[in-house]
Image (cartoon, helix red, strand yellow):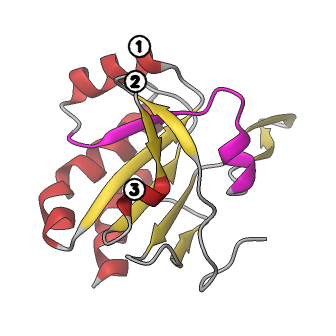
């Protein structure tokens, strides 16, 4: 179980431009690592827009945003273009990184149980240490939640 004060597990995933991105390449910056179910769905769109609208302030706090979902390069690229997202989206189609970060598990929607993405956000400090974990995300105000946590 990942906890505050622990080193964030490193990983390499493809981004929206089909390039390899490693968590460790952001040492020296804070990382807002958020896991979400699917591009172009109402909740995920609200969450991405909330983070987009807080992006300038996040940059001023030496923070970068990385979004992770099972979607592929083309879907991520289209989602970024559609919403003018100024941050990177990463592809985790086999949900290995989501499992590593406890963002993949059993969901219960309308009484039906299934496995899927659990909406979670980790804030990782400049040294790669977890400083905050959001297990419950308010999609409409997530940018503000993250800014508050960084202050």
Q: Which residue is mark 3?
A: 25
Describe the element under mark 3 as helix, strand or loop: helix
Instruction: Give the Cα distance between marks 2 and 1.
Output: 5 Å
> For the C terminus, which image quadrant?
bottom left
Category of crowding for the residue at label 3, using alpha-carbon neighbours closer than 10 angstroms: few (below 14), some (14–19), many (at least 20): few
Instruction: Give the Cα distance between marks 2 and 3.
Output: 21 Å
> For the N terminus, which image quadrant?
bottom right
Give the mark, 2 or 3, whose residue is nearer the N terminus: 3
Which image quadrant for residue 49?
top left
Instruction: Give the Cα distance between marks 1 and 3.
Output: 23 Å
Instruction: Estimate the x, y position of residue 67 in percent, counting from the top left.
Output: 44, 44
Residue contact between numbered discs 2 and 1, judged by CB atoms under 8 Å? yes
**Image point (44%, 41%), residue name:** 21
**Image point (21%, 65%), residue name:** 58
Give the mark, 1 or 3, whose residue is nearer the N terminus: 3
The foreground one among 106 and 22 is: 22
The answer to whether one can see residue 117 in this image is: no
Q: Which residue is mark 1?
A: 74
Q: Which residues are magenta?
A: 86-100
Which image quadrant for residue 142?
bottom left
């Amino acid at each position: 179980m990942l906890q505050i004060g622990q080193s964030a597990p490193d990983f390499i995933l493809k981004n929206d431009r089909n390039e390899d991105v490693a968590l460790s390449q952001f040492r020296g910056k804070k990382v807002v690592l958020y896991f979400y179910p699917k591009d172009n769905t109402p909740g995920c769109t609200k969450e991405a827009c909330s983070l987009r609208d807080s992006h300038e302030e996040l940059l001023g706090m030496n923070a970068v945003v990385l979004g992770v979902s099972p979607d592929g390069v083309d879907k991520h690229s289209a989602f970024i273009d559609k919403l003018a997202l100024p941050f990177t989206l990463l592809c985790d189609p086999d949900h290995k990184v989501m499992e590593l970060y406890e963002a993949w598990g059993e969901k219960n929607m309308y009484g039906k149980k299934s496995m899927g993405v659990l909406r979670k956000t980790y804030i990782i400090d400049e040294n790669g240490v977890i400083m905050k974990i959001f297990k419950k995300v308010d999609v409409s105000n997530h940018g503000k939640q993250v800014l508050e946590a960084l202050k």
